[in-house]
């Protein structure tokens, strides 16, 4: 089993989402000892945002019409989408920045959202091509957004990730959430404790699934 561990927070050791992804990956590896982990830090190695040159992945890599810059951009997109498609499990650290996700994480998503690789269009509409994976999102929020209609309307973090991974055909998308971490020490402690409970639940589900596969 291959696990792709992605962090996107710019806060390094002070990041809540990074703490959560590290715990999730550790728990997952404990449940699946044979798991190999590949790590991608989008805060330090962010792909450039899409441009006319980086749309080169829509053209054959060997197309003579591509410039050298486009070929480089094409190679980057190919490396990222191949890494994503090779993973069985993707753990994504996603802090809430200005009601959405970090631009670095969005840039990564834009690179892997490739027609013919992660989705396709049919006469019945779009169809995901990357099904069968498990995505676990470590969601960190300074405020509280999940407990009110107004808060849920303001967040475009979890809702966006649920939508985009679903668009790729992934139906097993799980969230480990720590919110209110900027609302004082007590609120932060409570949020991390709640997230730990969710991490244990995810790990237990993973262990149960592994046992079911072995029994089959």
Image (cartoon, helix red, strand yellow):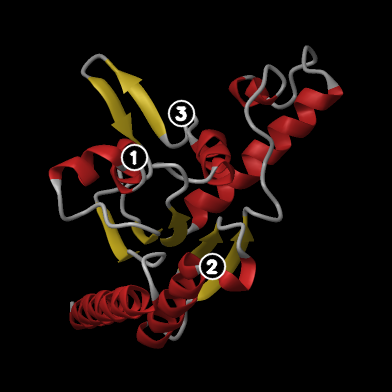
Residue 30 in percent (x, y) is at: 40, 87
Q: Nearer the viewer, mark 2 or mark 3?
A: 2
The secondary structure type at the circle numbered 1 is loop
Q: Secondary structure at mark 3?
A: loop
The residue singled out by tag 3 in the image is: 116
Q: Which residue is mark 2?
A: 15
Secondary structure beneath disc 2?
loop
Quadrant into which the C terminus falls: bottom left
Pick the front one: 169 or 150:
150
Q: CA distance from mark 2 to mark 3?
A: 35 Å
Residue beneath the point at 25% across and 14% down: 123
Q: Position of residue 199 (x, y in %)?
A: 31, 77
Name which of mark 1 and mark 3 comes first in the sequence. Answer: 3
Label 2 Cα neighbours within 10 Å, binned few <14 / some 14-19 / many ≥20 = some
User: Residue 49: x and y, percent?
Assistant: 64, 32
Which sits earlier in the primary sequence, circle 2 or circle 1? Answer: 2
Estimate the spatial distance between the alpha carbons at disc 2 and disc 1, rounded to whole Å: 20 Å
Q: State the residue position of label 1.
A: 156
Label 1 and label 3: CA atoms lie apart by 26 Å
Q: Residues within 10 Å of mark 1 (few under 14, many from 20)?
A: some
């Amino acid at each position: 089993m291959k696990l792709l561990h992605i962090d996107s927070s710019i806060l390094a050791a002070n990041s809540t989402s990074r703490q959560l992804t590290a715990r999730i990956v550790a728990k997952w590896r404990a449940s699946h000892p044979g798991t190999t982990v590949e790590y991608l830090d989008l805060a330090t190695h962010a792909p450039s945002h899409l441009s006319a040159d980086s749309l080169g992945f829509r053209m054959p890599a060997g197309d003579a019409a591509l410039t050298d810059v486009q070929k480089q951009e094409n190679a980057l997109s190919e490396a990222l989408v191949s890494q994503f498609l090779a993973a069985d499990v993707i753990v994504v650290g996603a802090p809430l920045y200005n009601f959405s996700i970090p631009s670095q994480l969005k840039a990564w998503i834009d690179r892997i959202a490739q027609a013919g690789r992660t989705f396709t269009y049919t006469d019945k509409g779009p169809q995901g091509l990357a099904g069968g994976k498990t995505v676990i999102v470590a969601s960190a929020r300074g405020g509280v957004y999940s407990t009110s209609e107004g808060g849920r309307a303001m967040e475009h973090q979890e809702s966006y990730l649920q939508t985009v991974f679903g668009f790729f055909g992934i139906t097993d998308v799980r969230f480990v959430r720590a919110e209110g971490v900027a609302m004082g020490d007590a609120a932060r402690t409570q949020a991390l404790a709640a997230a730990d409970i969710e991490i244990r639940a995810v790990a237990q589900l993973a262990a149960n699934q592994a046992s079911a596969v072995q029994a089959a």
